[in-house]
Amino acid sequence: MARISTYSLDTSVKGTDKLIGTDVENNNVTKNFSVGDLATFIADNQPSDLDLVGINLRWSKEKQYVSSRTDWTKPNLQVTVPLLHMEFENLTLEPGVTYEVVIERFTKKRKRGATATGYKPSGFKIEEITHTNSPYDVRPVSLPITDPTGALYDFKLDYYFSKGYPALSGASALSRDVYHSRLPIGFRIKKTTNGVVEYSHTLRKINLVAGLSDPVSQSGIGFTEL
């Protein structure tokens, strides 16, 4: 085979023209790829505009509130829940289009269930509220975005903890007697246009943290960077 630089240039490129390459999913076999197929692949895999959105967030201590939950097992427990102030960079709200910020929680790898085989992979997942039992079914999966330059969002973060606060909701019995806990959560954007739904990838990840204070009436929820 001669040096590539010695071959003449094709000045009339067509979709049926071919390039040589490697199929990495088939033991690195050498194959031909059509220019048309490559053009289609590149067009179909362009990043969404939503994936270019940046999320800036902080706790709003000025708007924090004390949890109204009455099922805490610890006497005199009061949990302060600060609202989340979120700003969305590179996000322009189009008329007639609905935008929402979606919360995800990190779940560990676990068995699929008694009647199913295999394991559910770990990762950030959007909660299916129809599968969530009371009182945790009040947690919103998403909240509408009305002002991308900054607004307050209440995801009812106190309901991510069991009545044995600060143990996480869904924690095993062996891990419920704790004094502090941490839950990785993420946020993505949901865009609905004429009934067609589009999601960004996970744009921001943080650790939701909680602990018992002394006295317990001054306990609260916060976050750290993931």
Image (cartoon, rainbow, N blue to C red):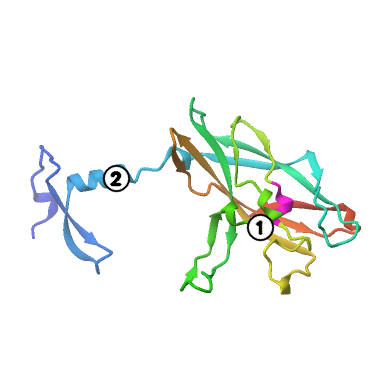
Name the kind of residue labelled 1 in the image: Asn
Q: From mark 2 to mark 1, how far is it between C-alphas?
A: 43 Å
In the rendered image of this protein, does residue 166 appear above or below residue 146?
Answer: below
Q: Which mark is residue 206?
A: none
Q: Residue 113: x, y in percent?
A: 53, 71
| 108 with respect to 74 (left or right) | left
Residue at figure coordinates x 86%, y 58% from the top left = 213
Q: Is residue 21 above or below residue 97?
A: below
Near-viewer residue (195 or 219): 195
Q: Measured from the top left, where is residue 80 in percent x and y?
A: 81, 48
Q: Residue at x 17, y 60 (%)?
A: 31
Using the rendered image of the protein, determine whether residue 187 is visible from the camera's viewpoint. yes
Residue 21 place in picture, x, y as percent? 20, 57
Q: Secondary structure at mark 2?
A: helix
Left or right placement of residue 101 versus residue 208 in this view: left
**Mark 1, secondary structure of its residue:** loop
Q: Quadrant of residue 147?
A: top right
Return the residue at label 1: 133
Name the quarter where the C terminus is drawn: bottom right
